Amino acid sequence: MNTKAKSKLPHRPFHQGWTIVAVVSLALAACAPQTSVPAEPPLAGADIGGPFDLVNSAGEPVTWEDFRGQYAVIYFGYAYCPDVCPTDMQRTAQGMRIFADEAPERAANTQVAFISIAPARDTPEVVGEFAAAFSDDIIGLTGTPETVKSAADAFRVYYKLGEPAPGGGYLGDHTNIVYLFDPDGEPLAMLPTSEGADAVASELDKWVN
């Protein structure tokens, strides 16, 4: 990571407070102990992820390349989402805290990012406040309708926002998958937020080295 990238994607550990995995046992010798090796990541080889040009809560440009050298947890949603997004983000943040308690160095090399699908209302300040409500270590990203659409397409994320209601609110349909990527930007797995924070931490432990 370069100095510029570090200023936008801080390496701060999370503070304290689905999964189909096969284990293959290999007998190295007749009397030798067996060795377990992990299965291939569920999303290995999937065409998910790609270049984007967005901005963080300070209005600074952030690209997909800024995440190189660290694991990335990526989620698309919107700050005014009434239930799904807050639940997914809360469980992701809690899972990261559990993982950080058990493996602080590996957790410190994992960056969580929330990417808005509703840039008209989710300004840099709004996405920053939304992300910080779950953890200071989560970054919020937004952009123009065009750059957000490009990012969502690269990550195979569907979204459609409803018409504004009389009170100003609105609902939206979107893919609510929490993706985990390796330091080269290759997809590894989906974090099982529907199963709770412990399941999220367990999945992180399997693939973050």
Image (cartoon, rainbow, N blue to C red):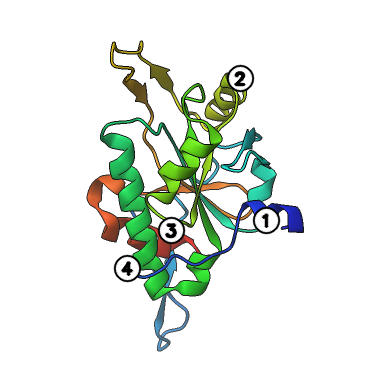
| Occupied quadrant, residue 33 | bottom left
Alpha carbon separation for disc pair 1 and 2: 25 Å
Q: Nearer the viewer, residue 202 or 76?
A: 76
Q: Which residue is mark 3?
A: 39
- Image x and y of residue 118, in percent: 46, 25
Q: Which residue is mark 1?
A: 7
Kind of residue at badge 3 = Ala
* Residue at horizontal 33 percent and vertical 37 percent from the top: 85
| Occupied quadrant, residue 25 | bottom left
| Occupied quadrant, residue 145 | top right
- Image x and y of residue 192, in percent: 32, 48
Alpha carbon separation for disc pair 1 and 3: 35 Å
Kind of residue at badge 2 = Glu
- Image x and y of residue 114, in percent: 47, 41
Q: Which residue is mark 4?
A: 17
Q: Is residue 143 above or below residue 55?
A: above
Residue 146 - label = 2
Q: Classify mark 2: residues with Cα within 10 Å, few (<14), some (14-19) or many (20+).
A: few
In this rendering, would 25 be left or right of 113?
left
Pick whichever of labels 1 and 4 is earlier in the sequence: 1
Q: Is residue 126 above or below residue 18?
A: above
- Give the label, 4 or 3, closer to the camera: 4
- Image x and y of residue 62, in percent: 66, 41
Pick whichever of labels 1 and 3 is earlier in the sequence: 1
Kind of residue at badge 4 = Gly
Tag 4 secondary structure: loop
Pick whichever of labels 1 and 2 is earlier in the sequence: 1
Pick whichever of labels 4 and 3 is earlier in the sequence: 4
Kind of residue at badge 1 = Ser
- The reply to whether residue 68 is visible in this rendering is no
Tag 3 secondary structure: loop
